[in-house]
Amino acid sequence: MKRREFLAGTAVAAGSFVILGKGITAWSEVDAARRAKLERIAILSLCFNPVLKRAEHPDDANRTLDILDLPAMVVARYGVRRVEFQHTDFASTEDAYLAEFKHRMEQARAQFNQINLEFRELNVSSPDPVLRAESVDLSKRWVDHAVRLGCPRVMVNPGRLEPEVRPAAFAALKAIAAYAKPKGVFITLENKDNGNPRAPQASWQVVVEAIKAAGLWANPDVGNFPNEKEREAGLRVLYRLTAGSSHCHYDPAKYSEAMAIHISKEAGYTGIYAVEADASINGPDPYASVKTILEELLRDI
């Protein structure tokens, strides 16, 4: 092992150094204002999908990052201590594996921001009551996993929330929230409508309706709006309904990230801004893409 690699590894274990930009910088020497901003940022594991090792892609040489090593990498490379995961990141939900996952987070001095559930057709918008019930049961199990891991938020994908299923869907979401509340876990919903007519999603107004009806919380996504008018109107509402987390992208050809952050400040938002990079927009190198979005946030928040 080279001395530089040894120093980086030691820094992560000790929690006293982080790699910010070029070289290794003592955390105590990082500008206090920048440190305060870094504490308000999380990074999604989803950003690193192109390089994460997957059981379904065992021979892909580009996949060099193990999910258990991701927390230490995020802390060391970006100085960010909060990490957000997809439920599919977890190779197992057995107690031993979850304990190891939590240990690796603690070892890196990292914290869970949120776990995002994506059960595809198994969601509360299903017209089949059996599938709705299964989605509720599975979501409750992930609430229990979040408790074991020390994760404060679980985000549920509610599906399309079509008018004919809304009463049943809202009831299902309410059951999930009622289960999570005494356990200290927030159940969140994200606005999903990106204006794609081939893959319609529930509008932000319907998401707000679901949040209020079921006693949930918003996870505002600054990118998921069909146009600028809807973005500005939606963010002003959603940022007042959060449990302290928001997803942030960087797509300057379509919208201003700075304006979205400005709206969050006007709404009195004091929570976490979670970096979500998209290879189709931000380029094929996830490490560079995350840094681009991170630096934009550090300028704006």
Image (tube, rainbow, N blue to C red):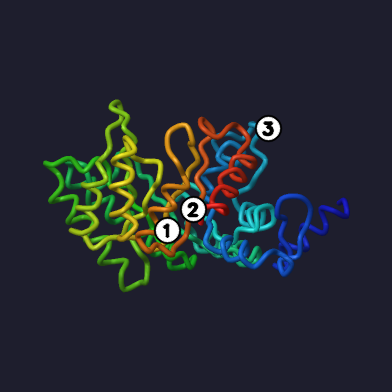
Inspect the image, locate mark 3, and give the three-letter code of the amino acid beneath it: Ala
Inspect the image, locate mark 2, and give the three-letter code of the amino acid beneath it: Ala
Q: Position of residue 206 (x, y in %)?
A: 21, 47
Q: Position of residue 76 (x, y in %)?
A: 69, 56
What is the secondary structure assignment of the residue under circle 1? Answer: strand
Which residue is the site of mark 1? 245
**Residue 12, located in which quarter of the rendered image?**
bottom right
What is the secondary structure assignment of the residue under circle 2? Answer: strand
Q: Nearer the viewer, mark 1 or mark 3?
A: 1
Q: Nearer the viewer, mark 3 or mark 2?
A: 2
**Who is closer to the viewer here, 185 or 259?**
259
Would you say the residues marked 1 and 2 are in contact, meaning their CB atoms lie under 8 Å apart? yes
Crowd tier of the residue under label 3, counting other residues whose Cα lies within 10 Å: few below 14, some 14–19, many 20 or above: few
**Who is closer to the viewer here, 113 or 282?**
282
* Residue 161 relative to residue 151: left or right: left
Which residue is the site of mark 2? 274
Q: Position of residue 222 (x, y in %)?
A: 40, 46
Question: As drawn, which residue projects farthest toward the bottom?
Answer: 182
The disc label shown at residue 142, or none: none
**Who is closer to the viewer here, 96 or 198?**
198
What is the secondary structure assignment of the residue under circle 3? Answer: loop
Q: CA distance from mark 1 to mark 3?
A: 34 Å
Inspect the image, locate mark 1, and give the three-letter code of the amino acid beneath it: Ser
Work out whether mark 3 precedes mark 2 in sequence or the reverse, and give the earlier one.
3
The disc label shown at residue 61, or none: 3
Q: CA distance from mark 1 to mark 2?
A: 7 Å
Work out whether mark 1 precedes mark 2 in sequence or the reverse, and give the earlier one.
1
Q: Residue at x 28, y 47 (%)?
A: 233
Crowd tier of the residue under label 2, counting other residues whose Cα lies within 10 Å: few below 14, some 14–19, many 20 or above: many
Q: Residue at x 48, y 43 (%)?
A: 249
